[in-house]
């Protein structure tokens, strides 16, 4: 198992072609002045404009499973969504996922079959994919299409530098001697971009994002993204991005300016899918990204995602908030895997393998979420077999992620809110049923726990948590984990065909074990 697929270097641009033999040479001398009673000579004919720019390569292919039902259950990197008739405490950990249903997506990290961040096999890309190296074709005689395309590309690359020299005009005769002056045309001028534009937000946010390289002791690994959390050098990312490097692996973080730092895992939370790493010899000029308020986000708000899709570091994409409180369950698919749950922000900003752990920003540049998962079609493109964006991305709300990150920095372990009862993970639309039997012979409702104190019993079906409709066990877990231990919530449940409500003070569970 490895984290997000990185791919090799981006293909370099071809070298500039030689200047054509028949290209008109620029005159080394200015035109001779005219007598006052003579009309100025016609200006020299400007050289022909360069060919049009070649078309860019096609966009990344979509991938994966058919779009999920209203309840989404992605699994990190080709993993399984835990399902079945029973589950442990609605806190952590749920049981290993029994198997990935056909529609289950995976993490948005790489090589996954669905939600946003799966993993690859550590190969970094397949033949013919993004990972394939680029080789400049040999020049061909004549006017073949290949030569035209290459020429157009080069022309587009250099046209900006030549435009000022090629586009000139003769000014009107304004001096007393009737001399003619040559000046560049007044086109455009300085470009200013407001802070609220995508370009303005990206220019401020990019220097505080990093591309993370993770490698396990077995040599497998991959690529993800992270962002600066504080001036001490802490970087927030996804757990599945750094999971391979937790025990004896290697980590590095590279900034857009090319500076690379070794890093270590400070703490990780598999249930939340959040991790914190710290840079070694962190620079003193780190600028943490400002954190927004994910509770105040509304559907339709603009979003900006930054990441390294398919290894293409420092990529910026845009979209909107498509939905809120989307229940997402994900797993890496390994035999001993434990699921991650989130009540996610859904966005149509393009998120692909390698985006995992990167920031989802609002229009003002505040972090409102951590990009973590995507729903995609089953087959990948570019010869890599990896999933890609179809406009269904999911991010961990920053209000939740901030609390988790602070606990990881403080204690090195996550703290989960819990209800103190075993919940069925069976997919239903009727609610979350408290199971009749606990896991491993434990009580289905913990004696003296939050659910027991509130009067809940095995067989009760929870249908609402505060004002959130609960349609299944995973949805209930995701909603509980948006709260902190000690929070009081109102639980609506059914027993014997009748509806009841009760107040539950959430307990706490430390660690993923």
Image (cartoon, rainbow, N blue to C red):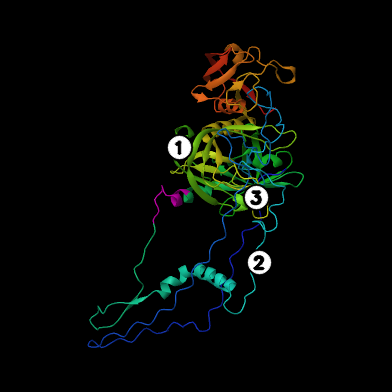
Mark closer to the chain start, 1 or 2: 2
- The residue where tag 2 is placed is 135
Mark 2 Cα shell of 10 Å, populated few (<14), some (14-19), many (≥20)? few
Q: Which residues are magenta?
A: 192-201
The residue at 42%/74% (across/down) is: 165
Quarter of the image for the C terminus: give it: top right
Residues at circles 3 and 1 in contact by the CB criterion of under 8 Å: no
Quarter of the image for the N terminus: give it: top right
- From the image, give the main secondary structure of the stretch colored magenta: loop
The residue at 51%/25% (across/down) is: 468
In percent of width and height, residue 90 lies at 63, 23
- The residue where tag 1 is placed is 299
Which residue is at the front of the view, 493 or 139? 493
In percent of width and height, residue 442 lies at 72, 17
- Which mark lies nearer to you, 3 or 2? 3
- The residue where tag 3 is placed is 380
Residue that lies at the very extreme toward the right in this rendered image: 218
Mark closer to the chain start, 3 or 1: 1
Asked which secondary structure carries label 2, the reply is: loop
Mark closer to the chain start, 3 or 2: 2
Mark 3 Cα shell of 10 Å, populated few (<14), some (14-19), many (≥20)? many
- Which mark lies nearer to you, 3 or 1? 3
The residue at 53%/79% (across/down) is: 19
Cα distance between the residues tagged 1 and 2 = 45 Å
Which residue is at the front of the view, 205 or 234? 205
**200 magenta-colored:** yes
Cα distance between the residues tagged 3 and 1 = 29 Å
Q: Is residue 286 visible?
A: yes
- Which mark lies nearer to you, 1 or 2? 1
Compared to 397, does 151 lie above or below? below
Which residue is at the front of the view, 36 or 71? 71
Task: Say which quarter of the image contains residue 339.
Answer: top right
């Amino acid at each position: 198992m490895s984290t997000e697929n990185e791919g090799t270097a981006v293909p370099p641009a071809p070298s500039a072609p030689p200047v054509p033999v028949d290209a008109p040479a620029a005159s080394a001398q200015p035109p001779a002045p005219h007598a006052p009673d003579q009309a100025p000579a016609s200006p020299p004919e400007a050289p022909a404009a360069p060919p049009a720019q070649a078309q860019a390569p096609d966009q990344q292919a979509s991938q994966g499973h058919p779009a999920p039902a209203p309840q989404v259950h992605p699994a990190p990197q080709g993993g399984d969504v835990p399902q079945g008739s029973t589950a442990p405490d609605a806190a952590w950990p749920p049981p290993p996922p029994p198997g990935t249903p056909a529609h289950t997506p995976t993490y948005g990290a790489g090589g996954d079959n669905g939600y946003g961040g799966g993993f690859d096999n550590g190969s970094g890309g397949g033949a013919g994919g993004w990972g394939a190296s680029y080789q400049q074709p040999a020049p061909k005689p004549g006017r073949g299409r290949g030569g035209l395309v290459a020429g157009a590309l080069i022309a587009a690359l250099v046209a900006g530098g030549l435009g000022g020299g090629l586009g000139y005009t003769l000014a009107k005769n304004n001096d007393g001697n009737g001399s003619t002056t040559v000046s560049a045309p007044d086109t455009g001028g300085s470009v200013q971009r407001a802070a609220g534009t995508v370009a303005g937000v990206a220019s401020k946010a990019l220097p505080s994002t990093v591309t993370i390289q993770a490698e396990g002791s077995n040599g497998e690994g991959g690529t993800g993204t992270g962002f600066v959390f504080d001036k001490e050098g802490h970087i927030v990312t996804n757990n599945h991005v750094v999971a391979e490097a937790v025990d004896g692996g290697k980590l590095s973080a590279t900034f857009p300016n090319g500076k690379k730092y070794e890093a270590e895992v400070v703490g990780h939370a598999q249930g939340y899918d959040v991790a914190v790493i710290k840079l070694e010899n962190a620079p003193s000029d780190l600028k943490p990204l400002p954190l927004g308020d994910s509770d105040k986000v509304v559907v339709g708000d603009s979003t900006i995602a930054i990441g390294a899709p398919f290894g293409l570091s420092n990529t910026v994409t845009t979209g909107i908030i498509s939905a809120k409180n989307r229940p997402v369950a994900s797993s890496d698919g390994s035999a001993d895997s434990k699921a991650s749950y989130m009540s996610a922000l859904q966005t149509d900003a393009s998120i692909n393998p390698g985006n995992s752990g990167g920031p989802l920003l609002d229009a003002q540049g505040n972090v409102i979420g951590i990009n973590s998962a995507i729903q995609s079609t089953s087959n990948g493109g570019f010869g890599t077999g990896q999933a890609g964006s179809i406009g269904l991305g999911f991010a961990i709300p920053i209000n939740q992620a901030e609390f988790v990150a602070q606990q990881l920095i403080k204690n090195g372990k996550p703290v989960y809110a819990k209800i103190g009862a075993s919940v069925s993970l069976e997919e239903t639309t009727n609610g979350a049923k408290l199971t009749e039997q606990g896991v491993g012979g434990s009580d289905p409702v913990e004696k003296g726990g939050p659910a027991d104190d509130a009067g809940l019993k095995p067989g009760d079906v929870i249908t609402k948590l505060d004002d959130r409709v609960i349609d299944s066990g995973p949805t209930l877990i995701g909603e509980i984990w948006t709260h902190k231990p000690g929070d009081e919530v109102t639980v609506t449940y059914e027993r014997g065909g009748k509806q009841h409500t009760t107040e539950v003070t959430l307990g706490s569970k430390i660690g993923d074990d």
